[in-house]
Image (tube, rainbow, N blue to C red):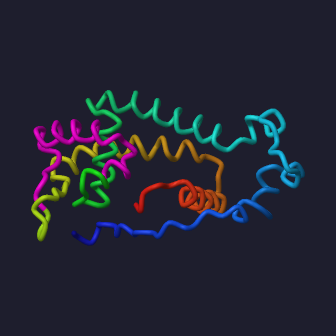
Amino acid sequence: MDETTTTIRKRKPRPRRASDRGGVDRAVLGGAAGLRAQPPSMGEIGLSSFAPYLLNRIAARWNADLAEALRAHDMTTTKMRVLAVLSVSSGLTVNELSVFAVTEQSTMSRTLDAMEEQGHIRRRPREGDLRVREIFITEEGRELFASVWPMMYEKFSDMFEGIDAGEYQAFLSTLHKVLANVRKHDL
């Protein structure tokens, strides 16, 4: 792997205990109601204070806007995600790529077949284990991703308009903590 490749860090699953859900976390999630035996109702929390709802709305809007813009480049969201991930970390397996690109493995396999045929990626056996195939972005794939990146960056910038660097870093820190709490893979 080259210098631009990120290292995939393996994490050990942390044990879940009932005490992990108490204290500050519960109070933050349920306000004063966090101290009672029953969780607050959805009505008490409200949609505007329910983070999964907000995350879904944001992700759905981002994905819909991006899919529409990608059509002008004859590209799907899955193909763009593959190119984006491989432009940062080439040499991944199908399983790893499926996790990072947030795509079902069956969809990923079909997408990779088409992308290889189009010359955007190449697959080769892993050194030391010929059963494992690693996926690499080609120069054509890099050029294709480079053609859509300015549009993606503009949409990304628009999404965070009015948010300063400190707020953005705090947001990323929180998202990483949430991801660590919910992820099922070591990636």
Is 117 displayed left or right of 151 in the figure? left
Is 159 displayed left or right of 84 in the figure? right
Seen at 58% across and 47% down, the residue is: 160
In the image, residue 183 lies in the stretch drawn in magenta: no
Say how many tags the image has: 0
Between 11 and 118, the one lying in front of the other is 11
93 shown above or below 150:
below
Query: Which region shows up in magenta?
Result: 97-125
Q: Give how far across and how far down residue 168 sits, in percent.
A: 61, 57
Q: Give how far across and how far down residue 3 sits, in percent.
A: 27, 72
Seen at 23% across and 37% down, the residue is: 111
Q: Give how far across and how far down residue 74 sits, in percent.
A: 26, 29
Asked which quadrant contains residue 41, the reply is top right
Image quadrant occupied by the C terminus:
bottom left
Seen at 16% across and 59% down, the residue is: 132
18 shown above or below 55:
below
In the image, residue 101 lies in the stretch drawn in magenta: yes
Q: Give how far across and how far down residue 19 sits, in percent.
A: 73, 65
Is 100 displayed left or right of 166 in the figure? left
Between 125 and 66, the one lying in front of the other is 125
Is 70 displayed left or right of 119 in the figure? right
Between 95 and 88, the one lying in front of the other is 95
Image quadrant occupied by the N terminus:
bottom left
Seen at 22% across and 51% down, the residue is: 142
